[in-house]
Amino acid sequence: MLGLQLPTDPRWVELVKGNISEILTDHAWCEQKAATNAISIVVHNSENEELVTDMLALAKEELEHFEMVHNIIKERGFILGRERKDSYVNELAKFMVKGRGRKFSLVDRLLFSAMIEARSCERFKVLSDNIDDEFLAEFYRDLMISEAGHYTMFLRHAKEVSSEIDVDKRWKEWLEYEAEVIQNYGKDETVHG
């Protein structure tokens, strides 16, 4: 369904198990960034009523996820650490094309967002299938389903932006690029690391 070309090695979960507080802190900040991304899309595309409606709902949901992760952090006696840079996301951002007009920029922003959601969904599945913490396994299974919905919503909106843009072709390019980028990740106890 996701179309990702390179799956996460399940051994990545061993890194996560060794530092649960780090994955939770990183995950919390990923949720905050996802909410911020949705608001940014609203700010730059306020004339698109359906997109604004969906992005506002997404921003609320992502903030709820942030709160859920923060509650787990507190319950386990951890402290929400400082925000981390997400090198994976920063590398993906380099692939967005500039200078081809507002519609193409929006399509690329939506595909960029879909890609992050797809990889997060895949990582959450790997976590839920391989972590020996029953609570976190169920938590990440539920979030995996949520991320899959976000992924499909972003793709749907990208396809609705303009019939002049071959979104399927551009999505294939994103998938190929992401396969190159993700080869350098999976070595840290972070969501995309």
Image (spheres, grey):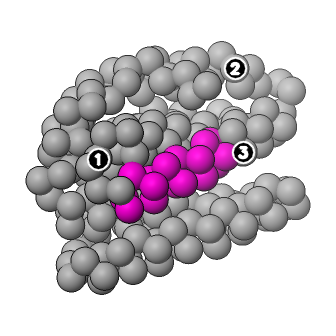
Give the SS element for disc 1: loop
Image quadrant in which you'd find residue 70: bottom left
Q: What residue do we see at 60% from left, 52% from top?
A: 146
Of label 2 and label 3, which has the lower sequence position? 3
Distance between mark 2 and mark 3 Cα atoms:
15 Å
Residue mark closest to the camera, 2 vs 1: 1
| Whole-percent x, y for residue 144 in the image | 52, 47
Q: Are marks 2 and 1 in contact (CB under 8 Å)?
A: no
Task: Tell me if residue 188 comes above or below residue 82 in the rendering.
Answer: above
Distance between mark 3 and mark 1 Cα atoms:
28 Å
Residue type, mark 2 in image: Asp
Q: What residue do we see at 35% from left, 75% from top?
A: 72
Q: Are marks 2 and 3 in contact (CB under 8 Å)?
A: no
| Whole-percent x, y for residue 153 in the image | 72, 45
Image quadrant in which you'd find residue 84: bottom left
What predominant SS class does the magenta segment belong to?
Answer: helix
Q: Which residue is mark 2?
A: 168
Task: Tell me if residue 83 comes above or below residue 12 in the rendering.
Answer: below
| Whole-percent x, y for residue 157 in the image | 77, 42
Image quadrant in which you'd find residue 180: top left
Please give the range of residues in magenta.
135-151
